[in-house]
Image: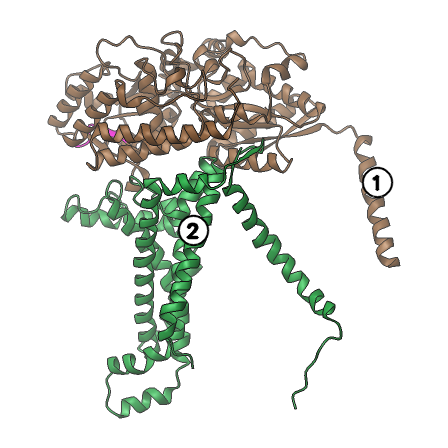
Amino acid sequence: MTIIKRGFAALAAGALSTALAVPAIAEPVKFDFWFGLSGDLARVVDTLCKNFNASQKDYEVVCTSQGNYDATLQNTIAAFRAGKQPTVVQVYDVGTATMMLSGAYKPADKLMEENGYKIDYSDYFPGIARYYATSKGEMLSFPFNSSTALMYWNKDAFAKIGKTEAPKTWEDVGADLKALKDAGYDCPMAINISANESWQLMEQFSALHNQPIATKNNGYDGLDARLEVNKTKFVQYVTDLKKWYDAGLIKIKSKDLGQDMVQAFATGTCQLILTSVGDHGTVGRTQKEGMNWDVAELPVYAGTERKNSLVGGASLWVLSGKSDAEYKGAAAFLNFIHDPKTALFWSTNTGYIPVTKSGFDFMKSNGFYDKAPYKGREVAIASLTASEPTEITRGIRLGNFTQIRAEFGTQMQAIFANKVSVQEGLDTLVKNGNAILERFQQTYPGKTLP
Amino acid sequence: MEKRVTFGRWTIGILFAVPQLILIFTFFYWPAGQAVYWSLTLQQPWGGGNIWVGLDNFRSILANADYWNSITASMIFAGISTGLAMVIALVLAALTDRQLAGSWLYRVVLIWPYGIAAPALALAFRFILAPEAGFMAVVNKVWPGFWDPGLDGADAMASVIIAFSWKYVGYNFIFFLAALQAIPRSLIEAAAMDGSGVIRRFWDIQFPLITPTIFFLLVINITESFQDSFGIVDIMTAGGPANATNLMVYKIYSDGFKGLDYSGAAAQSIILMLLIVALTIVQFRFIERRVHYR
């Protein structure tokens, strides 16, 4: 017994001395930042964190990659339930509705105000800010890494069919694909039809054509929103894609089959793809020697008044239940990220676009968009700002949207495998998607989106 | 007379059992109990609260055509992969047991696949079976369109079955070889002297004598094919195309962790547990009768 007692006493003394030692040395306040990027992008985030830590002495951000967006959200939820959540977390675009109802966050705009930072919210590109803002326009989180979808086209191949410009309408695309096929190109266009491509095929298409994905302004106005993509222009789009696929004008490319579409484009195998501006750097680095290519805005159907495209990526949320000192640090960190100089660093090292007008202007004045590897990325800004966001092109505010995207992949695969017709597949997508939305609504009884 | 060591008081016995009981309670009964509770409520993922919904979760799952599709896919997967893994392993073990040239090498090499983690294995098979770049690309050159796991559900199912069976052949092989080597040589030599051939000796002597091992492996393989298939499906097909390989265990993961529907996933895992229990009971009730324990 005495030995145990002595042991406890020693432990207590040890704990006490370390506890006393901490305030004696004025160490910076540490706080955690969890993010979902990996590989090259994770290294850029680490550098960003180092730069922040070096820029001041009061706070130290500890940045930890959780591997991917899904895992970041899952791990944050698990940590939150155990009371060990990070102070700042990166949550992907479609997790916004889930976050807003979680009751687990500290509104970013309040945080900045309380800590004496003045942020000009009108400086954000409206297409980006509205995606993450409440229906009343308050910013609950800060846009971080942002991108939008573009069309990548092979200039050499198009020159062979006498074209010097990218097709602007889907009608032109159809004709050009046919011409490319006749000119001997085996794969005029590559697409993939998994859950991930819901973004460029369904979401971006619907925004550009000002077509709703769901009722209640894509969910901004209530949890009782329901899908309606089975009766919009999207039906025609899928029908055309399927028609071109059947005619051999479109090939499906995915990693599981051996080559994803970005690789297929970069190697010159396929001549047209729709993907994120974030892949601009990858194509540039891995392209076939001497291949001429460029990016353009996604096409629209003839006679459509083009609207802004949607932002993709993630925003930074500050979680509740942290100390004032940590919140001070978090505010300083968000302010650092908001700085135009950080925007230049971030966009130079990744394919992401600046989220503020001042960041964009700063980059332009630095000649960023005139230099070879980055030239063309300004098209993304043009696409995002093609119009003032409408009630529908603000974004998508639907619960468990990850599962709806998975359902999109499932039904597209069924359509392309000729198991169901286009209309049947989209009807099932709406039916199953609505079951997901109903379930989400039931999980949060009496709650409304802010 | 047998000498027995007994404890004077029953409390000492209980005390010895307590560490084990605590372990089982913490790592099995408590989480299982939690899963049952979650399956009867609607849980908000962030822990903001829950509502009691009784059996609603089960009702909505069982009314869902996708879920029945998932059960069918799991059954097909379990049946074929167990059959393949066991038959191939038995043949290999029987051949190795015959001390053919180089059998010492097979004995070591054939065990390795079981030591490979499922995701690494799945990645390797994804390369091998990729229709445009891997080994199957050659086959596709000869018969265009023959192999397309990206859109053809049957091809995708075949891919995951091949990968899973490959891993379990290694596992089954160890047990079969051990069982075959435990058979007294004298029995086989006696049969050989009576003039029976290799095949005859296998069916009449070796096979009946290893039925306990076969039965054990059958139970393990079927159970594992319901549970251990996750890593392979996640890397190779992610449940696609069009849900063709959306096995029960993968659906639990994607609904629970990707869809944040903890309650629905908990209900599904209860159903999966009951299904495995039922299958195991059936096996013990009907197949074990034909097993001869020595």
Q: Position of residue B243 (x, y in %)?
A: 31, 41
What amino acid type should be assigned to the residue bearing mark 2? Leu
Please say whether residue A190 is one of the residues in the magenta stretch: yes
Above or below — where is A172 with respect to A404? above
The chain painted brown is A
Q: Tell me the tag on residue A17.
A: 1
Residue range highlighted in magenta: A186-191
Discs 2 and 1 carry the same chain letter: no
Q: Tell me how many marks there are.
A: 2
- Give the chain of mark 1: A
- Residue most extreme to the right: A2
Nearest the viewer among B277 and A350 is: B277
Q: Picture coordinates of residue B7 (x, y %)?
A: 73, 75
Q: Is mark 1 on a helix, strand or loop?
A: helix
The residue wearing badge 2 is B272
Dot 2 falls on which chain?
B
User: Residue at horizontal 27%, vertical 28%?
Assistant: A426
Q: Which colour scheme is used?
A: by chain
Image coordinates for residue A366, horizontal then vertical, percent? 47, 11
User: In the depicted view, which residue is nearer to us: B20 or A356?
Assistant: B20
Quadrant in which the N terminus of chain A is drawn: bottom right
Q: In this view, does A213 lie above or below B184?
A: above
**Residue at screen point 14% across, 30% down:** A247
Question: Label 1 amino acid?
Answer: Ser
Picture coordinates of residue B63, whole percent (x, y) = 36, 40
Q: With respect to residue A259, does A362 lie above or below? A: above
Residue A159 marker: none
- In the rendered structure, the answer to whether residue B59 lies left or right of residue A32 reads left
Q: Residues within 10 Å of mark 2 (few under 14, many from 20)?
A: some
